[in-house]
Amino acid sequence: MTALLLVVIYIAFIGLGVPDSLFGTAWPAMYREFNLTLSAASYVTILTSLGTVIASLFSARLINRFKTGLVTALSTVLTAVSLLGFSLSANFYWLCLFAVPLGLGAGAVDSALNNYVAIHYRATHMSFLHCFYGLGVSISPYLMSRTLGDAGNWRGGYHLAFVIQALIALVTIISLPLWRHIGQKHERRHQEISQHTKTLSFHQIAKLPGIPAVWLAFVASCAAEITCGTWGSTYLVNSRGMAISEAAGALTFYYVGMTVGRFLSGLLATRLSSWRLIRLGQLVFAIAIVLILQPWQTTVAVIGLFMVGLGNGPIYPNLVHLTPTNFGQDVSQSVMGSQMAAASLSIMIVPPIFGGLAQLLSPTIFPYFITLMFLLMVIAINRLQKTVAIENPIE
């Protein structure tokens, strides 16, 4: 039963990934159809991320009242409806309207399932969980590239994504009795865990050693991830001269890289520590930057995007897994929420920042912006590891 539920959770996390890569892939065709500026994408990404932040803040209350299974099912239905709304949108205002429920649904699923897997499953399952997210975000650019073609039919890509999301929503609804059955078995463990859990205020969390560093690490890593996903296709079209459909297909390799990186991380988690996996990811990320920065071969730049996903992909799940070790199991739930808030904040503010810079300067700043985020992440993780070593010398 527990293994079957894990399969359902993996499928639900595919659904979490499906919407996340659609918008950035479709935007080069979208803003031309609606006669918008390049930076107008920022309004949609901000509203989506705002919904995610709100859902993350209220996720604990929702889960306590409605349980993880029902929250997952309803949230997946909400994202499916939002994708259908995107495909039918007649103007930019409708895109902004449907962006809010899309973010609400995604934020609730992310918070609910990350916490559930962290409590009930091993570390390797956390990497595999995010690997399935990578599978979801890899599917979307491929679907979009197939429908864009010469006519720029981005609506067809959203419609196909809606069909997939609707099927995933159906799976989560059918699995509700399974959630209830497993929940009864875990009830005693929930009570034992709650007795030793401390709920901290934001001010108390901020005082913990290493917290500023881990927040910056999540901000920088997610900034690189969302910038590649949202603006990678636009960079390839406007700065590298690729056709819109080709750029959408090329962006698929970025998400494939992320998926492969997290899959390999899950396999290696039984042999290597999370810290070592993070370092390996940073090394691959550094090589990727060198490839993207070269100005001559577009193919090499696409390979560089693949390697950004390959290197950066394992960093997020391994940082999540290290939370109880770094800060203590008794406060890990409070810290986990703050980390996800930092990640959501990054996803909300970084794309519009880059969009404004690209509008003011040029999309050619893309590789330099990614390099800056990488350097900030390396500095933050180095600081975090040193602080943790001082606070927990036995570890």
Image (cartoon, grey):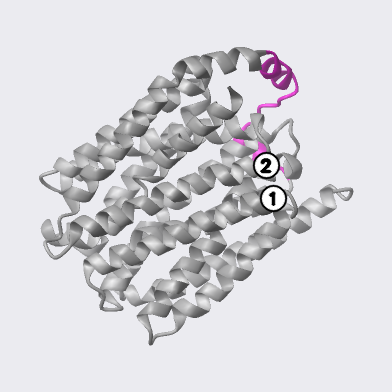
User: On screen, 256 above or below 174?
Assistant: below
Residue 364: image location, x then y, percent = 35, 77
Q: Which quadrant of the figure has residue 147?
A: bottom left
Q: Which residues are magenta?
A: 188-208
* Label 2 SS: helix
Residue ID for mark 1: 269
Q: CA distance from mark 1 to mark 2?
A: 7 Å
Q: Residue furthest bottom?
A: 296
Q: Which residue appears at 54% of the width and 42% of the height? A: 129
Question: Which residue is located at x 55 percent, y 67 percent?
Answer: 374
**Does residue 268 sit above or below 341 in this rendering?**
below
- Verify CB contact (< 8 Å) between mark 1 and mark 2: yes
User: Considering the numbered disc 1 on the image, is that residue within a helix, a strand or a loop?
Assistant: loop
Q: Residues within 10 Å of mark 2 (few under 14, many from 20)?
A: many
On residue 148, the disc is none
Crowd tier of the residue under label 1, counting other residues whose Cα lies within 10 Å: few below 14, some 14–19, many 20 or above: many
> Was residue 196 drawn as part of the magenta stretch in this picture?
yes
Residue that mark 2 sits on: 123
**x, y percentage for residue 166?**
30, 32
Q: Earlier in the sequence, mark 1 or mark 2?
A: 2
Q: How many marks?
A: 2
Q: Position of residue 184 (x, y in %)?
A: 60, 12
Residue positioned 26% across, 38% down in the render: 163
Left of 184 or right of it: where is 102?
left
Magenta stretch containing residue 233, yes or no? no
Q: Depth check: 311 or 382 in front? A: 311
Q: Amino acid at mark 1?
A: Ala
Q: Amino acid at mark 2?
A: Ala
Residue at 66 percent across and 27 percent down: it is 199
